[in-house]
Each structure stands twice: as structure tokens, then as C-alpha cells.
Amino acid sequence: MDDIRRRRAMASRATARAAASHDARAATRRARVGGAARESAARRRASGRATSDVDGASGRATSADAFDLGQAIGTLARGERGATLPPGRVGALGVRETLEYLADSNGFVRRRVERYGPIFKTALFFKPAIVFGSREAVREFLKFEGELPADEALPETFRELHTEYGALRMTGSRHAATRANFGKVLGRAALESYAPAIGERTREFVEDVARRCGKETSSFRPGAECVDFALDLLFELFLGHVPEAKYKEAMKAYNGGLLSLGKWSSEFKAGKLALEDLTSYVEAHYRGVKARGELDRPEYFFYKQYSQAVDEFDEVFSDDRIATTCVLMVWGSYIEAAALMGHACVLLGEHDDARRAVLREFERVCCDDENGCRRIGTLADIMSMQYTSAVAKESLRVMPQTAGGLRVNPSPRKFASFDVPAGYVLTADPRIPFRDEANFPDPDAFKPERFVPGTHEAKQNDVSSETYYPGGMGQHQCPGISLATVMTQIFLAELVSAFPNGWRGKTAPKYVQVPIVILDREYEIEFLR
């Protein structure tokens, strides 16, 4: 982590130096981001003999006439001579690009879009990749996305720790059967079942923060405390209880191992042991609940649904598969929810008007003069909080926490008028349309009204499945976005109610980049008196 932070700091300083000499060109490029005009320009650049690049170590734009030995070697080794690929750089082995992406994934994508347009070639996790995000490319991609294998695109460490039961590794009928079971534990009926517990636990969490701030300190560390809270809550929702501390630490170790740089790393080894401990614990607990005839108890809603889950052959899931699925679902849900809660917290602290609007909405839905403010306890309450939902959605747009899904192109094809060799990863990255002024005017501004139907801002924006897909798209889009949004809505409503004067960051936010963009655990905010 220290190495990544140092690389990020070095890249940031160098990028700042380069920015002064390239402001005019960058402004022109940003004005052209998105649409067919940019892709046409990208094709013209790709057809030239010389290549240009954004230096992965420094962020400097290299000369269009400079000779790139690594790219030349890679082009020959991959048999790409004569092919018309998108502009960009893969290099020989993709090391430089991968390390830059790991250091600052959002900045990595932003810099390349500014230079190349909404489709470019690069390397992700040491594999050649084509990243895209224009409406036209997304629409074309969805026509064949279901045919592409997902497993080979994932890093080796992720593939192993995600297990054979992980949906991100699946395609075809097996994947379809697995996804069919997600709706039972993440759909509307499931959210109605979870809402009372989410509301109760969130109020307890925020009240505890308020008590501490009243007695000991006025600060709060959302990157650490939201992670711990979300992990406890997701264990309770999916297992029916919060396990002892060692299993919570095991989940964090598992998260750390998923995108470790290799099986030789200590992070991977710790993650593998953690996965074994977690699945053994959950399987034993599930069997105990089943043996005692307790599956129909409300707290075991998740267990009950998966006790009836079937695979592509209509065979009931084994206890081992149920336990592993539960671990994977806790992992995917807690880290995603905690990231969104933290990002939204930071953004509301910086935008007083939005914070006050959330408070007014909470008071309208949950408060009256006679009884005060009750906790949010039903899905109907949550659905009534339209503006708070918009804050969560806009937070996902302004601070994307994950890339699009990765798919491997198994055979040569034409895509967006470019040649795509076999073995290239294809990924529709949401960070590209999120920053396209054609979709979201003034894209750097935080405007929750974009997602409130009927507002002036909403009418100006172009929000569709082709321009807004924070959880990815296609068959492997994240199924837990709705749960993360619900958790974030309740958290924000309770937070603004407990701290009506708002809060500010003590320092500029810092972020951990992988496997998901999330606030650093040491970042602090201070509540205003």
C-alpha cells in the first residue's frame, strides 16, 4: 500500500507540472469528449505510423513522433502489425499501465479519455485491453457481450479467490442460473425484509457516533467506520448474526487478497486462508440453523432463499456452495456499500444545500411535532426519499468506485470500426460516459437534481442504461447496487439529522484504489457545532 501511495503521489506531482503546458490542448480535448466526432478523431490517430501516449509513470504527454520501444515490441509479439487498433499504449507486458491504473484508476481513465477520446487501448492487470464508453460503442458491445468469456479477463489471484461459484467467473447457462438466485436475496422482496434491520442498526450506529462526538471528539473516520458498520450489517442480513471479530478481520484479509499482485504475495496467501476460515464457519453455522429447523425465522431470510436455490441442471445447491456464496455476497455488498456511504458523506459535507435538502426530506418522511423523528423502518419510507436516493446516484457518478466488467475477446473482430485481436480484454468503463458533457452537462459538478425526475437538471441530462451504469452492464452487472443505495440513503438521512450543522474534512480525501475505490481508513471529518 505504501508503494502504491508513493507512486500515486509521484504521478500527481508530475501530472501537475505537465498540466501547465497543456492546458489549452486539454481544454479543447475535453470539449470534444464523447460522440462520433471523438471516435473519428481517434481512428485518424490510430491509423498513423507514429503513436502518442500519456506516460504511465509521470503523466507527461510524449511526442507523437517519439519511438516507443516497449509498444513496438508488444505490437510485434502480439501480431498486431497492419491492424487498426484504437489509439493508446499497451506496451510490451502492460506493466507500466497496470501499475498506473492500480495507483489511481479514476485518474488513469480520465487522462486517457482527454488524450485519446472515449475508446483507447491500454493494459489492465497485465493484459491488453480496449476501454470504451461512448453510447455507440456501448450499444454495439451489448449485442455480443453475452458471448464473451469473463473468467480469463480476471487477474489470476481474483479468479482463484472468487472461487468456481463466483458469478464473475461464469458464462452461459451456469451464469444464468446463478444470477436467477440473486433476485431472491437482492430484489424488492428481499429489501423489504432487510429494511427494518438496516434502519435500526443505522440509527444505533449514528447515535453511537453522536455520543462519542459529544464526549470525546468531534471527528469521524468514514473510511474506517463505515467499513466496519457495513460489514457487521451485511453479516447480520445474510447470516442472521454478527460473528466474532476474527471472522470480520478474515473478511478484510480476503478483500485484500483478491487483487494482490500474485500468488506469491503475502496478501494472496492471507486471503486464501481467510476464505477457508470464512466458508468453514458459515457452512457449520448454516447446517446448525437447518438442523434446528430455524430456516423460517426472519433473521435467516438469506439462508432460506438459498436452501431452495438450484443450478443449471435443476440440482439443489450443496451446503458448501451456499456457504461460499454467502461469503462472496457479504464481501461484494459490504465493500460496495461502505465505499458509497463514504463518498456520499464527503460530498454532502462539501455541499450544504444538498445536505439541508436531505435533512428536509427526512423530516418530511419521518418526523412530526408530536412524536419527533422515528427511524426509517420500511421500504416505503426509503422509496419516499427521492432526493436522498438522487444524492446516492450522483455520488456514484461523481466518484465512481469501480470499473466496468472485464470480458475477453476470444477471436478477431471489428468493434467501433477498429480491429480487436483475439485475447484483448473489452471493458465498458462507466467513468467515460459519467464525464461526458453530452450526457451530464457540467460533469465535474455535484448535482443530485440530475436524478430527481421533473427537475431542470434532470431534463438537461441524458440518463439511460447506455450512459449510466455504475455497477457495470450486461450479464455481469453488479446485482447489489440497490442494496448499497438503500443502506446509503438511510445512513445519510440519520447523519444529517444527528449533525444538522454539517461537517468538513480535516484534510483532503485520500483513497484506496483496489479492488474498489474507497476512502482511506485514516481520513477524518469534523462535525460542526
Image (cartoon, grey):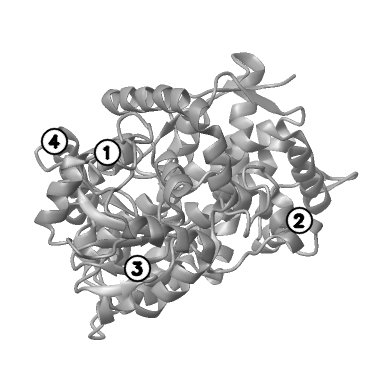
Kindly identify the amino acid type of the residue bearing the numbered disc 2: Glu
Label 4 crowd bin: few (<14), some (14–19), many (20+), radius 10 Å? few
Q: Position of residue 242 (x, y in %)?
A: 40, 45
Q: Quick check: 417 left or right of 396? A: left
Question: In this figure, which residue is indicated by the disc labeled 1?
Answer: 66
Q: Is residue 419 above or below residue 119?
A: below
Residue 308 seen:
no
Point out the tag, 3 or 1, that comes first from the N-terminus.
Answer: 1
Q: Position of residue 23 (x, y in %)?
A: 55, 33
The residue positioned farthest toward the bottom in the image shown: 314
Whole-angstrom CA distance, mark 2 to mark 4, is 48 Å
Residue 457's disc number: 2
Q: Are marks 3 and 1 in contact (CB under 8 Å)?
A: no
Question: In which quadrant is the C terminus drawn?
Answer: top right
Question: In this figure, which residue is indicated by the disc labeled 4?
Answer: 265
Label 2 vs label 4, nearer the camera: 2
Whole-angstrom CA distance, mark 1 to mark 2, is 44 Å
Point out the tag, 2 or 4, that comes first from the N-terminus.
Answer: 4
Whole-angstrom CA distance, mark 1 to mark 4, is 36 Å
Q: Are marks 1 and 2 in contact (CB under 8 Å)?
A: no
Foreground: 1 or 61? 61
Q: Residue at x 66, y 42 (%)?
A: 445
Label 2 crowd bin: few (<14), some (14–19), many (20+), radius 10 Å? some
Point out the tag, 1 or 4, that comes first from the N-terminus.
Answer: 1
Q: Residue at x 44, y 69 (%)?
A: 137
Q: Is residue 373 above or below residue 436?
A: above
Residue 293's disc number: 3
Q: Residue at x 35, y 72 (%)?
A: 415
Kindly identify the amino acid type of the residue bearing the numbered disc 4: Ser
Label 1 vs label 4, nearer the camera: 1
